[in-house]
Image (cartoon, rainbow, N blue to C red):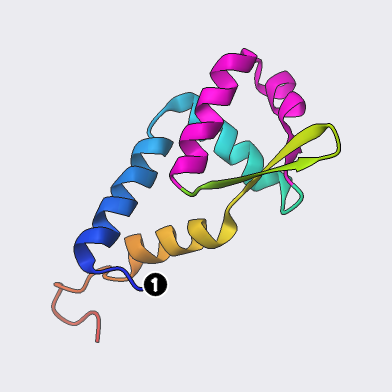
Amino acid sequence: MEMDADERETVTAMMLSALGNESRLRIYKLLVRAGFDGLNVGDIQERLKIPASTLSHHIATLRHAGLVIQRREGRGILVSAGYETMANLITYLTEECCADVEGWGA
């Protein structure tokens, strides 16, 4: 489903807001570095020294913003970065770069 400009700005603002917290940014960067397989929630907690309840809240916020994907694997929960969403966010932020500068753009 295609979003109109207002919807796209709303979604982008929600993503940036989710990343605007230091702990969530650290979680997201860790997941981006981990690759498509992601990491077990316990591994994230151990690496970043974040209490389980706090980590759960941060992951839920990132998931709600569409930035991470959470899935059950056996008894564990794996979390991975939503790379397509990340690429769309970067594209949105850069697609109009210098559009109003004379001599740049289309």
Lateral position of residue 13 relative to residue 89, left or right: left
| 49 in the magenta segment | yes
Residue at the right extreme?
74
| 3 in the magenta segment | no
Q: Nearer the viewer, residue 101 or 64?
A: 64
In percent of width and height, residue 12 lies at: 33, 52
Q: At 45% from the left edge and 26% from the top edge, which residue is drawn?
A: 22
In percent of width and height, residue 4 lies at: 24, 69
Residue at the bottom extreme?
106
Q: At 18% from the left edge and 82% from the top edge, which residue is drawn?
A: 103
Q: Which residues are magenta?
A: 38-65
In percent of width and height, residue 43 lies at: 76, 27
In percent of width and height, residue 102 lies at: 13, 78
47 lies above or below 104 = above
102 lies above or below 75 = below
Q: At 48% from the left edge and 49% from the top edge, which residue is drawn?
A: 66
101 lies above or below 50 = below
Q: Secondary structure at mark 1?
A: loop
Mark 1 = which residue? 1
Say if residue 89 shows up in the picture.
yes
